[in-house]
Image (spheres, helix red, strand yellow):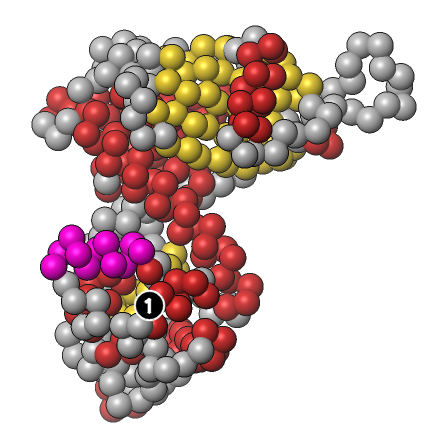
Amino acid sequence: MAAVRESVCEVLGGAAAGRPSLRRRQVLVLSGRRSGGGAGGASAGGPGGAVPPGGGRPPGARAGGRGARAAGRGGRVRGAPPPQPVAVALAVDAGDFAGLARYGLFGGLGHAAYLRQAEEQLTALHRQGLEVHLRVLEAGDFEDYCEALGLDPRMPAARVAYAGDPELAGEPFVYAGERLAELLPVLLDDHRARVRMSVACAVLLDAVGGDPSGQLRMAAVMRYVTSVYLALAEGAGEGCHLLTLRCHGPEDGEELTSAVDVCVEEGRLYPAGRDAEAFCVTLAAGVALGGEGALLLHGDPSAGVRVDGEEAGARLRPPVRGWALTGGRLRTMTAHEVFDELADDAARGLPFPPGVDPLPGFPLPVFRGAGEGGGSLG
């Protein structure tokens, strides 16, 4: 998965730049337990445990900063390696919290009290200068993870392993001292994008194969879909637009979906971060599979078009353009096909956007690598 992500970052200019850190991460699960043991049940400072709040370095001192000049003053010795990042699995959703409480993870706390204590612990870790990586602790996913690896979900080792699971795609979500009330919706959105990336990465890697030629095919596909993303942004023009994608294998395989806001201001494309990565990887999986699906570009509502015959004062109608994915190739839809796709989305439970103007898609780059695209690359 790291190779997939590096391909996206290389061409997009690093929506979340850089390779994943090769430093081993300390991991913890906020468990509602206070001092006397590491969060998550692991002993503080022990294998997989977090440095206890107040220990090791004065609060607020970053590794190598002014507060860490000498070990005798509570800091680390000059020239010592930087502290390992701490990975935290946080039970964000009340339903997940209730489902996990039966394993005794939270020491009898209610969800609100758990989140308040979690914020205190995160703040303490951040003030010590530790780099904290957050992920969402989902009940069903955690139970599946434990079952797959033969772990007991009641044991600290299971929570430690889940918090630092390297199979979750994308760069870590780094905590920067925010209030949880503001951070949790952002963390949830980020988590959903990482899950979509993980699923799409697995499909893509299965499609191209793991041998050296498969890596070359994957690189070609990733370059192509990134060029498509940039062409869509250029064609969309000024404003904030919405790209939606759904695709599946040629034999009605698992449906993959993705959505990303594309914002262009004064000709500059603003980074969309994780969502842009997830979009590119999902489209790459559809191309590599020789898959079927649809891609829609919903234009900025404030920059809509006026339909012929409408009065000058009439409300502008946001354009929606579309492309069909057929046999792993993108082709422009007609306006009628775009309308039909919107209607199909509505039948699947998505709201039909009111007052839009279905339009044909504009030309996009043609795939000319890894067997000329179209059809499975495996």
How many marks do you count on the picture? 1
**Residue 98 visible, this orientation:** yes
Give the image location of residue 35, x and y in percent.
Answer: 31, 89
Pick the quarter of the image with the C terminus: top left
Please report the residue visible at 27 percent of the width from the left and 36 percent of the height from the top: 201
- Identify the residue under disc 1: 100
| Residue 51 in view | no
Q: 28 or 226: which is nearer to us?
A: 28
Mark 1 residue element: helix
* Image vertical order of residue 198 relative to residue 350, above or below: below
Q: In the figure, is residue 270 to the left or right of 105?
A: right
Crowd rating for badge 1 (residues with CA inside 10 Å; few <14, some 14–19, many 20+): many
- Position of 210 relative to 30 (above/below): above
Q: Position of residue 320 (x, y in %)?
A: 62, 22
- Main secondary structure found in the magenta portion: helix
Write down the quadrant of residue 98 in the picture.
bottom left
Residue drawn at point x = 55 percent, y = 63 percent: 182
The quarter holding residue 65 reads: bottom left
Residue at 39% x, 37% y is 278
77 is within the stretch colored magenta: no
146 in the magenta segment: yes
Name the residue: 35% across, 65% down.
99
Give the magenta range.
Answer: 140-150
Can you say which quadrant of the picture contains the N terminus?
top left
In-front residue for pair 63/169: 169
Decide which of 184, 354 is in the foreground and name it. Answer: 354
Q: Position of residue 350 (x, y in %)?
A: 56, 34
Residue 246 position (above or below residue 133) = above
**What amino acid is labelled 1 in the image?**
Leu
